[in-house]
Image (spheres, rainbow, N blue to C red):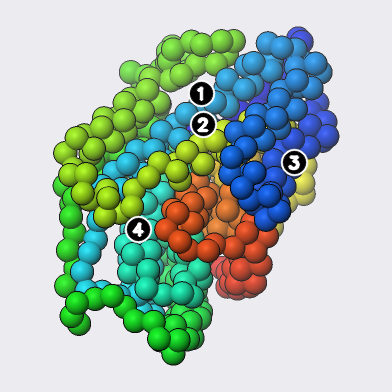
Amino acid sequence: MANPMTALAAEQEGGASASSVPLWMCIPFAGLLLCIAILPLVKAEWWEEHQPHAVALWSILFIIPFAMRYSAGTALETVLECLVNDYLTFIILLFGLFCVAGNITMSGDLAGSPRVNVGLLALGTLLSSWIGTTGASMLMIRPVVKMNAWRKKKRHIIIFFIFLVSNIGGCLTPIGDPPLLMGFMRGVPFFWSLHLAPILFFNMLVLLTIFYFIDKRAYRQDIASGLKPDISKPGTEVKLRGAHNLIFLVMIVAAVILSGTLPSMPQFQDAAGKVLGIHLFGEVELSYPAIIEIVIILVAAFLSFKTTKVEIRRENHFTWGAIQEVAVLFIGIFITMQPALMILKANGANLGISEPFEMFWATGLLSSFLDNTPTYLVFLTTAGALGFTEGMVTTLGTVPIKMLMAISCGAVFMGANTYIGNAPNFMVKSIADENGVRMPSFFGYLLWSFGILVPVFALDMLLFFL
């Protein structure tokens, strides 16, 4: 994530500038999203088998017209930049967290009741800012699924898990979500994000209250239908097996922090201030900080498997299906969304957005469908160029505190609006599906998010950003 903007930075002979990319080149991105949304409903078995073919098709439908319009070299450079500096670190981080969290299991006498579930969601939400939304999601999703395995009505539990643990909870530190890490790399102090604590706790209070009453009703219906939790005795004993893997989780978090701090150190820069790395093609380089991050994460995953008994993974029903599905779908998403990111970068400053509440909704709604990290950077850059003289001084300019809060919350919070809005969303869905939880479709999830989250975000706007 050290270089998330894959749009071409400068216009060059035979190349493409962000301002010259036509809107119709976004069609492959829209087509892939429609496949993800519709095909599981109408051709589920076909889609499960042919996901790689659909991804390859839509990717080619972007790459070939792009190469014909500009040049084969420009197309290759654009795709390589995307894959090397965006997708590679993205999927390695997910892979590492998936492996380490899969080697930790929680067992005991806790059963999925409304109070227990509220406690688990609150714990996961608070963890998200300190081990990342992906780390907290991978650590907590299996215990949540396991403790609610006896219940029939439980999809809402996973939906609120995605809302809170996989997204909203990551707003307090740069570790929590990649957009905030990018802000830290551009001069925003590490602990500045703690300013967002009142907004986080307000959202937690509102969403957990809504969740409690929904879960209470579903819980009573499950009990009335004769379902009972499978526990040997009442109590609150909880056992954590594979706890030594928390060390490897800390290693991964440290790797993410290093990826955000090493590029600014003189040892990793040349005389012009450019981050050093391995040259691959054109302007594409794999930076040394990214290599260090990747190595640390892979070592952590390897040691986790070597030091953990296979029985723990069996108890977790660990399979590779979820990470495989995410890896396949998101390589297509990362490639085909390049024109949309280029257009957004070229036109972000011309949108006439100058108020905090406008930044909140613009950053958030675009982050729901595009990568929230480049979207955050576009609007942070836009805010820094508006000529403000008071506020947070960053390398991109001075940004008023309320506007910086709005951009940060929009990027972090509204990733919860869709399955593709943030990396762990689809991973959590896949793990839940594997464990027998019937998750809603892409459009079904939108009904939940727009029905519950959008009104909460409207309250955020009224209370914090006007």
Q: Amino acid at mark 2?
A: Tyr
Q: Are marks 1 and 2 in contact (CB under 8 Å)?
A: yes
Question: Where is mark 2, residue-wise?
Answer: 87
Marks 4/1: CA–CA distance: 31 Å
Marks 1/3: CA–CA distance: 24 Å
Q: Amino acid at mark 4?
A: Arg
> Where is residue 340 drawn, in percent x and y?
71, 37
Marks 1/2: CA–CA distance: 6 Å
Q: Amino acid at mark 1?
A: Val
Pick whichever of labels 3 and 4 is earlier in the sequence: 3
In the picture provided, is 23 more to the left or to the right than 169? right
The quadrant the C terminus occupies is: bottom right
Question: Where is mark 1, residue-wise?
Answer: 84
Q: Amino acid at mark 3?
A: Gly
Secondary element at image label 2:
helix
Marks 3/4: CA–CA distance: 32 Å
Question: Where is mark 3, residue-wise?
Answer: 31
Label 1: few (<14), some or many (≥20) within 10 Å?
A: some
Secondary element at image label 1:
helix
Q: Which mark is residue 142?
A: 4
Q: Residue at x 62, y 59 (%)?
A: 441
Mark closer to the observer (3, 2):
3
Instruction: Kindly indicate the quadrant of the structure image that contains residue 375.
Output: top right
